[in-house]
Image: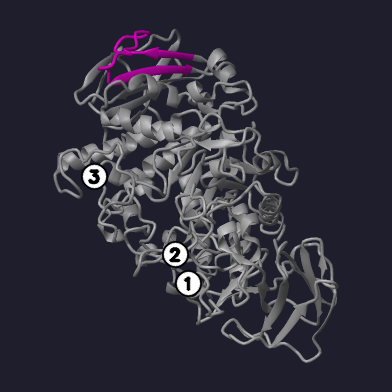
């Protein structure tokens, strides 16, 4: 990437707004926030690999500063111009000031970041006099892209099925059938849109695609997941075919456009709780060297960073400067990149004040909730942090939806056969009214999931009793040990037919539970074909076949793929699952015909030692009815069906049967002619009532 600076480049004072590098008719306006800086220098470079600036401008605090903002207009430069700053000021780490005049800093509002061949994370550590980490900002003109008239799908939460996906891992495996140069890229995902469409998902939730530091990982490994942001505006260049920051922007926009054409929404997993700069021993890329205390929660006596994120530092999200920048970043992704929503990583961090204390009315979260530009977006909170602040059920506002970790745990526990789990399981399938039954909470407040990127895959949940994270280089100490998993007799892969059949059935049981439950379902990438990570439940640094989607599994586990596809179809078409999103959860619980059963109708067993539960759900308007039997007991049980005058029961799902008898479309579901039904141990049956005729 070469961008020569011409001889006729010159400057004048410019304006403090907007922040960042803004292309104007005659050049580019630069604006930078730094309250306590004593000197600011803007450097222009001919290329991303150049370490010596071709032109530098020292900003005069009298001419080029207003309030806390430094600004300059440079004429006759534009799209693709590489630039960076040097900022001098007090070096007083003990009070949170970490200015270092030797450091080359990127612009916090950069819309593109380039990494030269000299990039080295270690060079940016502490006060090291090596001034150039090899990372620089790039001026971007966003106006040229052709959206071809594509429109955002704007699915209601009633109709939403989320697919959590890693952009790189989705197509990196050689079995993907993607041209090698496109594997692991936005372009690769575009070629797999027909797969996503046929699966029946309505939204993809992309793990972080904001520029992150791949070197923020144990020695010899790479940061694969991307939860190590360098910048909140730039697209991760490594996900483009050309590995170029400007090409990445176009490629990402193309992905959004093509997904929208396929009626699929794009949700970004955004990380505003910490950055790649780490703690006081970490590197300085940007925020530390500009105004450390405005961006991070820092102890004003010791200068140490608070670590509520578990990643070394914690963003000072409710500081006026960072709060505005986060809102500006969200606006950028919605208006310029046209994404449809956000999942906020460790969102409870964003409820903390500058001292780290939880706030009752956190300004940032309320700003997001009430922002008009964001009003049409979906917003999902991971409503906890790494320091024990757990806000599932108590997160602010009525627009926010929450990742429901209790759904994951209680559904896992029930199907594993744990004692005293039936009543909690029933609540989770009903939208978790014990957590969300408030007039202001919709039936879809709960984002239901069995598995996510963090933890076991669904296959590994039924194949391993213990985590196996040895490849991470931390002696298997990392990752959660509380997995509620079971190997059902053999640890890891097996050729024992009985064990494999049970594992397959348990996968179907949990996915069927997920897609029949009230709430917003999320499927983790590859669970529909039993993707394995070989027992690794913390594969954040495994950019290899441990983490990648092996596309051969679509044939090996074609029965599972068919099952999930038809379950999505049933969820989309069966009226008893189609709750109006404008009804509150409490209204649903009070007004919808939901009855609980045991082996006999209307006789549920809620005891500690019960392992089975049945229910009927009757739609209040259409009077459509489902009968669902969940038998987590290890032996078969006989259930007596509720009698329905003038209607017959038709078999829709039986996870104990082999494909294609394990699931039917509603139209093709066969009539069941008996008053009782034998339900295999650890299996699930779903029936639909149809008028007799």
Question: What is the spatial separation of the Cα atoms under label 1 and label 2, in whole angstroms?
Answer: 8 Å
Q: Is residue 317 left or right of residue 692?
A: right
Is label 2 in a helix, a strand or a loop? loop
Task: Say which of marks 3 and 1 sits in front.
Answer: 1
Q: x and y percent of residue 597 in the render? A: 36, 13
**Which residues make up the magenta segment?**
594-617
Please indicate whether residue 573 sits to the left or right of residue 557 in the image.
right
Residue 14 falls within the magenta-colored stretch: no
Classify the position of the C terminus by image quarter: top left
Give me the disc on residue 216: 2
Describe the element under mark 3 as helix, strand or loop. Answer: loop
State whether residue 220 is above or below residue 546. below
Q: Please report contact status of discs 3 and 2: CB closer than 8 Å, yes or no.
A: no
Residue 176 appears in the figure: yes
Element under disc 1: helix
Q: Is residue 88 left or right of residue 435?
A: right
Q: Closest to the observer: 273 or 291?
A: 291
Q: Residue 623, labelled with which disc?
A: none
Compared with residue 182, is residue 541 higher up or lower down, i.e. above or below? above
Indicate yes or no whether the magenta region holds residue 612.
Answer: yes
Q: Residue furthest bottom?
A: 7
Q: Earlier in the sequence, mark 3 or mark 2?
A: 2
Q: Residue at x 57, y 39 (%)?
A: 357
**Viewed as shown, does residue 538 lie left or right of 109?**
left
Q: How far from the left and from the top, in percent, is residue 458?
A: 33, 44
Alpha-carbon neighbours of circle 3 within 10 Å: few (<14), some, or many (≥20)? many
Q: Are marks 3 and 1 in contact (CB under 8 Å)?
A: no
Look at mark 3 in the image and give the residue it sits on.
466
Whichever of callouts 1 and 2 sits on the residue coming sooner in the sequence is 1
Label 1 sits on residue: 121
Give the Cα distance between marks 3 and 2.
27 Å
Q: Are marks 1 and 2 in contact (CB under 8 Å)?
A: yes
């Amino acid at each position: 990437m070469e961008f020569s600076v011409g001889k006729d480049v010159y400057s004048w004072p410019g304006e403090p707004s907007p922040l960042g590098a803004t292309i104007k008719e005659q050049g580019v306006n630069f604006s930078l926030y730094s309250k306590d800086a004593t000197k600011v220098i803007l450097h222009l470079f001919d290329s991303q690999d150049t370490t010596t600036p071709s032109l530098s401008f020292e900003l005069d605090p009298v001419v080029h500063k207003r309030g806390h903002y430094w600004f300059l207009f440079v004429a006759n430069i534009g799209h693709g111009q590489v630039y960076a700053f040097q900022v001098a000021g007090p070096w007083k780490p003990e009070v949170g000031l970490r200015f270092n005049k030797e450091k080359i800093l990127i612009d916090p509002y950069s819309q593109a970041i380039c990494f030269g061949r000299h990039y080295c994370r270690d060079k940016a550590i502490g006060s090291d006099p090596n001034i150039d980490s090899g990372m620089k900002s790039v001026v971007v003109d966003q106006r040229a892209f052709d959206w071809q008239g594509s429109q955002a799908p704007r699915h209601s939460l009633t109709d939403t099925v989320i697919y959590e996906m890693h952009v790189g891992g989705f197509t990196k495996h050689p079995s993907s059938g993607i041209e090698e140069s496109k594997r692991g890229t936005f372009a690769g995902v575009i070629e797999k849109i027909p797969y996503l469409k046929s699966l029946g998902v309505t939204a993809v939730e992309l793990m972080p695609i904001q520029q992150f530091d791949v070197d923020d990982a144990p020695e010899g490994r790479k940061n694969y997941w991307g939860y190590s942001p360098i910048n909140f505006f730039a697209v991760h260049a490594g996900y483009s075919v050309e590995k170029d920051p400007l090409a990445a922007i176009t490629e990402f926009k193309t992905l959004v456009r093509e997904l929208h054409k396929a009626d699929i929404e794009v949700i970004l997993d955004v990380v505003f709780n910490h950055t790649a700069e780490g703690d006081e021993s970490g590197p300085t890329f940007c925020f530390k060297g500009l105004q450390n205390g405005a961006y991070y929660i820092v102890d004003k006596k010791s200068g140490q960073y608070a670590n509520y994120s578990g990643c070394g530092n914690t963003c000072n999200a409710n500081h006026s400067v960072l709060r505005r920048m986060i809102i500006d970043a969200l606006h950028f992704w919605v208006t310029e990149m046209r994404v449809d929503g956000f999942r906020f990583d460790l969102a409870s961090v964003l409820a903390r004040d500058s001292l780290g204390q939880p706030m009752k009315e956190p300004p940032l979260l309320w700003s997001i909730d009430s922002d008009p530009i964001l009003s049409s977006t979906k917003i999902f909170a991971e409503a906890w942090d790494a320091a024990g602040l757990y806000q599932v059920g108590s997160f602010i506002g009525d627009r926010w939806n929450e990742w429901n970790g209790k759904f994951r745990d209680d559904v896992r526990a029930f199907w594993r056969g744990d004692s005293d789990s039936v009543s909690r399981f029933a609540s989770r399938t009903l939208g978790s009214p014990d957590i969300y039954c408030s007039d202001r909470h919709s039936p879809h407040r709960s984002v239901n999931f069995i598995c996510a990127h963090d933890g076991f895959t669904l296959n590994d949940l039924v194949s391993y009793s213990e985590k196996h994270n040895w490849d991470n280089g931390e002696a298997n100490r990392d990752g959660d040990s509380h997995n509620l998993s079971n190997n059902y007799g053999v640890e890891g892969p097996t050729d024992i037919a009985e064990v494999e059949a049970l594992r397959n059935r348990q996968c179907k049981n949990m996915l069927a539970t997920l897609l029949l439950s009230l709430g917003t379902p999320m499927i983790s990438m590859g669970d529909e074909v039993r993707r394995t990570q070989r027992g690794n439940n913390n594969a954040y640094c495994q950019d290899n076949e441990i983490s990648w989607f092996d596309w051969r599994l679509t044939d090996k586990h074609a029965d599972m793929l068919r099952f999930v596809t038809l379950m999505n179809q049933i969820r989309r078409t069966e009226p008893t699952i189609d709750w109006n999103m404008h009804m509150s959860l409490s209204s649903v619980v009070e007004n919808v015909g939901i009855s609980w059963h045991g082996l006999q109708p209307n006789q549920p067993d809620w005891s500690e030692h019960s392992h089975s539960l049945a229910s009927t759900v009757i739609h209040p308007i259409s009077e459509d009815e489902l009968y669902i039997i969940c038998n987590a007991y290890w032996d078969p049980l006989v259930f007596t069906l509720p009698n329905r005058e003038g209607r017959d029961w038709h078999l829709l799902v039986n996870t104990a049967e082999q494909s294609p008898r394990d699931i039917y479309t509603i139209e093709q579901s066969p009539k069941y002619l008996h008053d009782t039904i034998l339900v295999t141990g650890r299996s699930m049956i779903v029936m639909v009532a149809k008028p007799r005729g």
